[in-house]
Image (cartoon, rainbow, N blue to C red):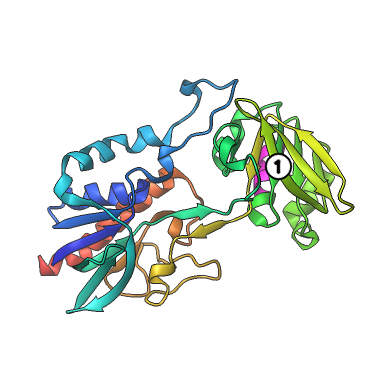
Amino acid sequence: MYDLIIIGGGPAGLTAAIYAIRKRLDVLLLTKDLGGKTNYRLALPWVQDYQVIRGLEVVSKFRSELEYLDFAHHIEAVEKISRKNGGFAVTTKGGAELEAKAILIATGARQVRMGVPGEKEFTMKGLCYSALSYAPLFIEKTTIVVGDDELALRSAAELATVAKQVYLVCNDIRTLETPVGHKLQLAENVTILKDFDVVEVQGDEYARKLRLKDSTGKLVDYEADGMFIEKALAPNSDFIKDLVKLDERGRIIVDSANRTSVPGIFAAGDVTNNIAEQVLIAVGDGAKAALSAYDYLLPTL
């Protein structure tokens, strides 16, 4: 039986794993890959590498250290978690069952995609899913935001503070009846496109144009320097939903010490009811969760 099993190899999971190893815990990291969202970055024709704080560089030390300690990680997805022998049993997709005294979940969240032609080809090539991360790069540029909920409005509002023009493709009028929605409707550099559906993403080496269809079926193209798909974030929490409490969006509810509703289960990063989906926040979250898990385990060590 392990002291701690960490599920998820993104910024939060990697940080937690290294902290746990340095605390001399018998720890295993279970993940589909190492690095998570830090394996991707937005490429733009006018931006040089030095202008971007790359999440990959922030966690690369932890990643390389864990790759060297190959006994401490296993590349496989998790199917479910259950209680067993006073601790927990983790069942992997391959059917293995691993036991631990404590669990730390850092499985992150996935972006809801549009599912239109060109989206996959231009992902992170002028088109991405996080204005919060990249808005400062779009000073005096033209941008498009696609989405109907609070995330999209927040992204459009942040871009509007620096961009020359922001187009917001938003069909939910109720979302606009909020303080941020009212602000966007009054902003001179924001155009709200209602009753439009995205048909295709077009471009060359980078995404350059978004093709939309209005309610009559007419096609119209909008050119932009950057496109942000801000439809939603779906937390990767299905495998744990019957064991710990989730909020209305499916995120794991944690307290200030990253403890879930079940003693011995901790969570960190984008899978939780966190304040923002940022690499550095996830790194800090992972460290805090690992220290909380260590405090929980200390009487048994």
Q: Position of residue 198 (x, y in %)?
A: 73, 47
300, 243: nearer the viewer:
243
The quadrant in which the N terminus is found is: bottom left
Outermost residue toward the left in this view:
301
Work out whether 51 lies above or below 188. Answer: above
The quadrant in which the C terminus is found is: bottom left
Q: Residue at x 18, y 66 (%)?
A: 297
Based on the picture, tell me whether residue 291 belongs to the magenta stretch: no
Q: Residue at x 39, y 62 (%)?
A: 256
Main SS, magenta residues: helix
Q: Position of residue 158 (x, y in %)?
A: 66, 41
Classify mark 1: residues with Cα within 10 Å, few (<14), some (14-19) or many (20+): some
Q: Is residue 158 left or right of residue 235?
A: right
Q: Which residues are magenta?
A: 154-160
Q: Residue at x 66, y 47 (%)?
A: 116
Residue tagged by mark 1? 200
Q: How many marks?
A: 1
Q: Position of residue 133 (x, y in %)?
A: 54, 39
Work out whether 48 lies above or below 219. Answer: above
Work out whether 163 lies above or below 195. Answer: above
Q: Is residue 55 left or right of residue 181?
A: left
Residue 225 quadrant: top right
73, 23: nearer the viewer:
73
- Please name the amino acid that badge 1 sits on: Glu
Outermost residue toward the right in this view:
216
Q: Residue at x 36, y 56 (%)?
A: 106
Q: Position of residue 170 (x, y in %)?
A: 76, 52
Work out whether 53 lies above or below 105. Answer: above
295, 2: nearer the viewer:
2
Q: Secondary structure at mark 1?
A: strand
